[in-house]
Image (cartoon, rainbow, N blue to C red):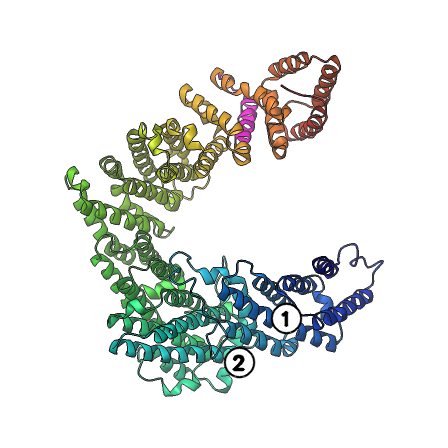
């Protein structure tokens, strides 16, 4: 009964629409009265029961629904009722937070309290937005503090917190990338909002936690230099790392807001608080001296109390970096927590994107301390950039066996260099050139492949801020020339040398560098990058032929071409485009040559072996996009070879490889049909002009798509038939081969729809494809109808079927125009509903 009762209460908490929203029947006064009575009884309910784990979900849903449907009404009820409501949901939130912490420590599969906490925090985010005005914040202050404190305590080890030990997830950071960041993202976002509502409370707690844990960490490291840790000391170290990890996550969400797809900015609450500090206690000199002292681990600056809180927290994070590097220097780096290191990189990225060299015009007012410490043309900003670049280099050197950490490190580098306001300063720093020079010295295979390409992407992006053409060319030569020299040396080697592991590692490393370079190309740098890549690309077909048995190299070559086409082709002029077309086709031809027989054997039918074929389809799709988006300069009269010609020519090599067995792989199948439909939508005339054998293979794959691979592929095949049918009719295509290929689909589609072999959701799509085919083959359609009617043994069924077909085409003009098509579709829906009621096809 409890479940049903809670379900009813949840529904009552979300009454809206015609029940409570019609002002003619229900007044605002009545809505408030209903809400007041509901809240009074809700208060009696939760104060007289002990909420069990399963019941918490229902209770939290009530609060979430109330905040969603009655948020404006909650602000209108009397002050005492609001205070009571906030007191109760604050207590519930804190209780659920404790329950969620216990669930996490016990590794329970059923996360009732965690889900309930999510509901409560979602309700709080709505309430915080509604009560965001300054005069309303006083009402929310104590509640925000209580929830913020409780959440922090539940993620800290005793004595400061109540987090319980949990050993089940030890050493899983590599298998569960960004686990806590993604798993608790929504929770952390709301905790960040709560912290920003009371920055005078939250920020001091956070920097005190960081500083106290750093002191303990330094002591632990000193102890480890003298003797091995005891079991108790090791447990303390693990707890300390977990505390730092969660403190960093909360710091990152309090100081910064998620900005996916938007320009990262300093939150208004933090900017205002920094201004208040400047007017009361903080000063720029103390903040700068604190920032400059982060490499000194022996003493804390005396001016710490006059430092801006935001700068102080950031300085603490930089000091953590220094501790990590110091540990690595004394051969204790392997004792540091990769999870904490990842959180540091994540925190640095968020902070730098929002605070480092901010665009002052984006703000109504700015904090003199923040702008003076890390704004444009400041020594502080230059210091921070050099420090971060040095930390990136340190991570690459000291933690090269931690792929997740390296990925976060490279993400930090790539994200800050792609911001023009920051990259123009980065390119002048000593730290960038140290990083570039270090890369030149690394041996092939020293770093994971995606890290190598990520760094070169960052190097290329950093040069886009240069305005002077000569200066830009000089910069890119310093980045690209060493790679070019390595490739030239490799190309002069004997073919037999490529069968040795050292040569293969060199090839793989070079291809990773080239892919990173291609991914970093932008409109301001593509010409320099392509001029460098073009000669290398022209030699790739030969390299693929030599290394055709080494799948990793084959895939990297294909991916390189795909990235060049994806990132640069839309900008290339006719001559450069033709160069890329020629090189691409040579590679596809070479690939098909060496894989034609291999692809048809059972030993190759493994999903990992299909990745290279998927890369070929990606390449052809990227090339085809040139005809959709062409940003190049030049006269159209110069163009003699189009992207669609190249895609179709490439498809002619790949089509024989697309066997039924290979098309059973969903991702590959989807890619293939997506490409075919795109070509047909853009250039149906070129499909019509295909050679007979290729046209036959293409239509055979469309037939397979209608019956073998699920709704998505059936939809694509129907789109193909509809597009081709409309083109053939409207342009009166006089092509016997095309008519021969297209005509059987009229009967096939009728059979599939009449015999329930097609998903009912696709009937409308199938109807417009049938309509297009009837336009092309009206006589054949009449004969099909006659045959179907005559096939009925029951005269009554035959008459009803004949009448249904008459109704189907009644008043419909077969001219492939939109209105006629829509009328036929509506008629067809009624036709199918009628016919399915009496017709049984065998």
Label 1 residue SS: helix
Q: Is residue 763 left or right of residue 449?
A: right
Please report the residue visible at 58 percent of the width from the left and 24 percent of the height from the top.
Answer: 749
- How far separated are the C-alphas under marks 1 and 2? 25 Å
Q: Is residue 101 left or right of residue 665?
A: right
Quarter occupied by residue 225: bottom left
Query: Would you place residue 748 above or below residue 564 in this image?
Result: above
What is the residue that sits farthest to the right in this orientation? 25
Q: Is residue 643 visible?
A: yes
Residue that badge 1 annotates: 92
Residue 539 in the image: above or below residue 64: above
**The quarter of the displayed image where residue 335 is located:** bottom left
Which circle marks residue 200 in the picture? 2
**Membership of 551 in magenta stretch:** no
| Magenta span of residues | 717-735
Residue 133 numbered mark, or none: none
- Asked if residue 733 is among those painted magenta in the image, a careful observer would answer yes
Residue closer to the observer: 841 or 48:
48
- Residue 435 location (% of width, % of height): 27, 62
Numbered disc in front, either 1 or 2: 1
Report whether residue 369 is seen: no
User: Does residue 805 appear left or right of residue 20 in this picture?
Assistant: left
Q: Is residue 242 left or right of residue 760?
A: left
The secondary structure making up most of the magenta span is: helix
């Amino acid at each position: 009964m409890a479940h049903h009762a809670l379900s009813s209460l949840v529904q009552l908490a979300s009454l809206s629409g015609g029940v409570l929203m019609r002002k003619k029947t229900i007044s605002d006064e009545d809505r408030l009265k209903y809400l007041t009575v509901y809240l009074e009884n809700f208060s009696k309910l939760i104060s007289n029961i002990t909420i069990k784990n399963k019941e918490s979900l229902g209770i939290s849903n009530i609060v979430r629904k109330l905040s969603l449907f009655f948020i404006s009404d909650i602000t209108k009820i009397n002050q005492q009722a609001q205070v009571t409501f906030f007191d109760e949901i604050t207590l519930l939130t804190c209780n659920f937070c404790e329950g969620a912490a216990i669930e996490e420590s016990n590794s329970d599969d059923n996360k009732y309290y965690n889900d309930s906490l999510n509901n409560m925090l979602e309700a709080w985010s709505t309430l915080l937005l509604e009560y965001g005005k300054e005069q309303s914040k006083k009402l929310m202050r104590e509640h925000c503090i209580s929830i913020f404190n409780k959440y922090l305590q539940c993620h800290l080890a005793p004595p400061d917190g109540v987090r319980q030990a949990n050993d089940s997830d030890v050493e899983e950071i590599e298998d569960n990338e960004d686990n806590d960041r993604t798993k608790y993202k929504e929770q952390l976002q709301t905790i960040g909002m709560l912290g920003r509502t009371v920055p005078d409370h939250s920020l001091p707690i956070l920097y005190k936690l960081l500083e106290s844990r750093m002191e303990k960490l330094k002591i632990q490291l000193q102890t480890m230099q003298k003797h091995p840790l005891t079991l108790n000391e090791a447990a303390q170290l693990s707890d300390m790392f977990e505390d730092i990890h969660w403190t960093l996550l909360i710091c990152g969400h309090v100081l910064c807001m998620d900005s996916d797809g938007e320009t990262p900015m300093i939150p208004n609450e933090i900017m205002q608080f920094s201004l208040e500090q400047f007017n009361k206690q903080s000063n720029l000199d103390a903040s700068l001296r604190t920032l400059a002292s982060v490499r000194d681990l022996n003493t804390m600056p005396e001016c710490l109390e006059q430092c801006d809180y935001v700068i102080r927290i950031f300085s603490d994070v930089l000091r953590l970096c220094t501790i990590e590097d110091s540990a690595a220097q004394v051969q204790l780096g392997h004792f540091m927590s990769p999870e904490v290191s990842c959180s540091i990189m994540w925190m640095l990225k968020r902070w730098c994107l929002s605070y480092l060299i901010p665009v002052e015009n984006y703000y109504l007012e700015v904090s003199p301390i923040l702008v003076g410490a890390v704004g444009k043309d400041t020594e502080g900003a230059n210091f921070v950039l050099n420090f971060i670049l040095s930390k990136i280099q340190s991570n690459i050197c000291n933690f090269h066996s931690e792929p997740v950490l390296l990925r976060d490190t490279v993400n930090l580098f790539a994200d800050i260099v792609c911001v023009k306001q920051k990259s123009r300063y980065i390119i002048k720093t000593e730290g960038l050139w140290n990083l570039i020079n270090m890369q030149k010295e690394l041996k092939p295979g020293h770093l994971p492949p995606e890290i190598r390409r990520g760094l070169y992407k960052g190097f290329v992006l950093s040069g886009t801020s240069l305005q002077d053409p000569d200066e830009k060319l000089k910069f890119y030569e310093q980045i690209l020339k060493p790679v070019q020299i390595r490739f030239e040396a490799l190309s002069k080697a004997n073919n037999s040398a490529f069968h040795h592991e050292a040569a293969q590692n060199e090839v793989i490393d070079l291809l990773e560098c080239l892919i990173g370079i291609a991914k970093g190309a932008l409109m301001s740098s593509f010409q320099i990058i392509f001029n460098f890549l073009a000669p290398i690309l022209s030699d790739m077909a030969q390299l693929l032929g030599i290394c055709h048995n080494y799948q990793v190299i084959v895939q990297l070559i294909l991916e390189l071409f795909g990235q060049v086409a994806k990132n640069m082709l839309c900008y290339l002029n006719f001559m450069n485009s033709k160069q890329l077309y020629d090189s691409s086709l040579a590679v596809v031809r070479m690939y098909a040559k060496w894989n034609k027989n291999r692809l048809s054997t059972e030993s190759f039918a493994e999903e990992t072996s299909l990745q290279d074929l998927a890369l070929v389809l990606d390449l052809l799709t990227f090339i085809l996009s040139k005809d959709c988006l062409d940003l190049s300069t030049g006269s159209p009269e110069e163009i003699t070879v189009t992207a669609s010609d190249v895609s179709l020519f490439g498809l002619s090599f790949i089509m024989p490889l697309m066997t039924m067995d290979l098309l059973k792989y969903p991702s590959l199948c989807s890619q293939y049909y997506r490409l075919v439909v795109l070509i047909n939508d853009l250039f149906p005339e070129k499909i019509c002009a295909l050679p007979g054998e290729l046209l036959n293979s293409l239509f055979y794959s469309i037939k397979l798509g209608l019956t073998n691979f699920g709704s998505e592929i059936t939809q694509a095949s129907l789109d193909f038939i509809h597009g081709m049918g409309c083109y053939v009719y409207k342009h009166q295509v006089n092509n016997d081969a095309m008519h021969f290929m297209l005509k059987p689909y009229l009967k096939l589609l009728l059979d599939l729809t009449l015999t329930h072999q097609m998903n009912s959701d696709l009937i409308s799509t199938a109807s417009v494809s049938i309509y297009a085919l009837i336009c092309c083959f009206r006589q054949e359609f009449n004969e099909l109808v006659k045959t179907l009617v005559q096939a009925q043994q029951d005269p009554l069924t035959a008459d009803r079927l004949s009448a249904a077909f008459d109704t189907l085409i009644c008043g419909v003009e077969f001219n492939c125009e939109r209105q006629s098509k829509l009328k036929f579709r509506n008629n067809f829906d009624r036709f199918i509903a009628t016919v399915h009621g009496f017709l049984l096809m065998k």
